[in-house]
């Protein structure tokens, strides 16, 4: 883990795209927001988003299951839910090997 290092965020991505493509801040924000909205809407429909060679976003379903309250030890039921996973593709897997 890289504790103490700054995380790259949406603003950093926007600044990079502004410089790279000579876009305005408003154009850059619209593109970034549309990309993430596209991913979100398709995941909500249950679609897989495959961005070769970078990776795949998909949803998984976790069934109702028993859990335990850590303070009391009481057994409780945890609701079913959908969650998003990202499986890195070759472009990112190869980065993890380099040190």
Image: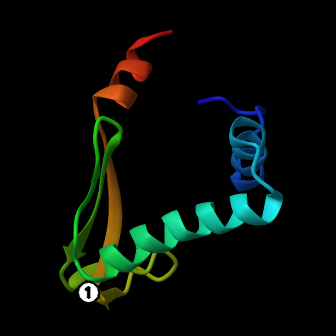
Q: At which x and y percent is residue 16?
A: 73, 40
Coloring basis for residues: rainbow
Q: Residue furthest top?
A: 99
Rendered view: 85 above or below 97: below
**Figure disc tally:** 1
The front one of 25 and 74 is 25
| Quarter occupied by residue 82 | bottom left
| Pointer 1 residue | 80
Rendered view: 1 above or below 45: above
| Quarter occupied by residue 10 | bottom right
Q: At x 33% / y 58%, what residue is drawn? A: 85
The front one of 78 and 49 is 49
Q: At which x and y percent is residue 55?
A: 31, 43
Q: Is residue 2 left or right of residue 74?
A: right
| Quarter occupied by residue 45 | bottom left
Q: At x 72% / y 63%, what residue is drawn? A: 27
From the image, which quarter does the N terminus lie in?
A: top right
Instruction: Give the structural element (helix, strand or loop) at label 1.
Output: loop
Q: At x 69% / y 41%, what residue is drawn? A: 21
Q: At which x and y percent is residue 30?
A: 66, 68
Q: At which x and y percent is residue 42?
A: 32, 75
Q: Is residue 12 left or right of residue 92?
A: right
The front one of 25 and 86 is 25
Q: Residues within 10 Å of mark 1 (few under 14, many from 20)?
A: few
Q: At x 81% / y 56%, what residue is drawn? A: 24
Q: Residue furthest front?
A: 22
Rendered view: 59 above or below 71: above
């Amino acid at each position: 883990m890289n504790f103490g290092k700054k995380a790259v965020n949406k603003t950093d991505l926007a600044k990079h795209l502004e410089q790279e493509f000579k876009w305005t801040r408003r154009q850059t924000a619209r593109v970034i927001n549309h990309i993430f909205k596209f991913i979100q809407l398709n995941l909500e429909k249950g679609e897989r988003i495959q961005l070769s060679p970078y990776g795949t976003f998909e949803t998984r379903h976790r069934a109702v299951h028993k859990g335990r309250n850590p303070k009391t030890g009481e057994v409780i039921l945890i609701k079913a839910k959908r969650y998003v996973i990202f499986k890195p593709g070759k472009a990112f897997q190869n980065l993890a090997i380099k040190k």
